[in-house]
Amino acid sequence: MRYKTLLIGENNAIIDDFFFQMSGHFDIMTTSNRNDDIINHLEVFQPDILIYCMNADSKKDFNRMYFLKEKLKKKGILLGVIGTKEICREFEKIAFDAADIMLETPLTANTIMTEIRVFIRKKKSEQTEKEEEQKLIEEKEENVTEIQKKHILVIDDDPMMLKLVNEQLHERYNVATAISGKLALTFLEKKHTDLILLDYEMPVNNGAEVLKKLRANPATKDIPVVFLTGVSNRSTIQEVLAMKPQGYLLKPIDSENLFKVIMDVLGKK
């Protein structure tokens, strides 16, 4: 993914490196150090990150960045600073924790590119988790009519799969979604569900690990779990069945089979 990067500062060598060696990985634009120019570029360009390429900068320049940080935060724009160890220390003294990421030169262009891309990806992932967590919290505000429906929690790291299953189920059931096992377990600390549809292949905590944690917790050990899996070979199916779930469904999910399995499982409760 190409991230939008707005560059400011007097370190022309670093700015040139961005344009000549990193333009294949970033959409890049520069602006002057004037507040009006910076703010106008933020509005028009809407970057993922503003990078301050420091050189012989003054305390006035550092103060400007400190006060600009609040505007960046409101817009969800990250602030990165690049400079020598000495100038980075000076920046920290005056601008405190304004920088989201600080890179001390000398660094190769490839290192700068990698560090920034990894950092932005991490921050965006964290933001996605926060949004998902907020959506789970909002589930607690369901009206009385919705509460009468059976509740199903769908756990899958694929946003499109979550959307698809939610669209198929939401008219008959209360549906909550979680993009990771971690978020699902947090959700279940405060809210009950009648059934869990759990993706078997997930990064970090896969379906098997999530199920082990559910079964180890007295509060969640009796919740029925149906695995979702996109792998249909015999060994994988045997692994799934060895976990003793209440059922499993092969992806892509057939809506008729989905409802049949859900009704069979909930009918046994």
Image (cartoon, rainbow, N blue to C red):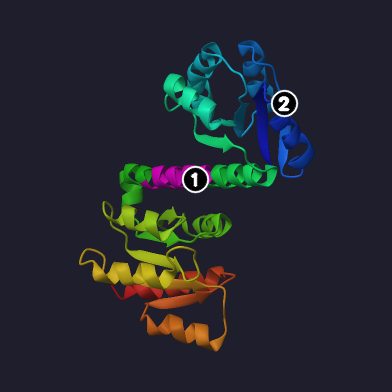
Q: Quick one: 258 or 62, which is closer to the camera?
A: 62
- Please name the residue that numbered disc 2 is placed on: 12
182 relative to 10, above or below: below
Q: Nearer the viewer, mark 2 or mark 1?
A: 2
Q: Which residues are magenta?
A: 123-136
Q: Quick one: 83 or 4, which is closer to the camera?
A: 83
- Whether residue 266 is visible, yes or no, is no
**Left or right position of 118 against 210:** right
Inspect the image, locate mark 1, and give the three-letter code of the amino acid beneath it.
Thr
* Res 128 label: 1
Occupied quadrant, residue 143: top left
Query: Contact (CB < 8 A) between labels 2 and 1?
Result: no
Q: Quadrant of the C terminus?
A: bottom left
Residue at image position (52%, 36%) is 101
Magenta: predominant secondary structure element?
helix
x and y percent of residue 212 in the render?
A: 32, 72
Q: Is residue 124 magenta?
A: yes
Occupied quadrant, residue 204: bottom left
Occupied quadrant, residue 158: bottom right
Measured in 3D between alpha carbons, the distance from the residue under mark 2 to the one under mark 1, in whole angstroms, is: 34 Å
**Left or right position of 256 against 154:** right
Q: Secondary structure at mark 2?
A: helix
Q: Quick one: 38 or 170, which is closer to the camera?
A: 38
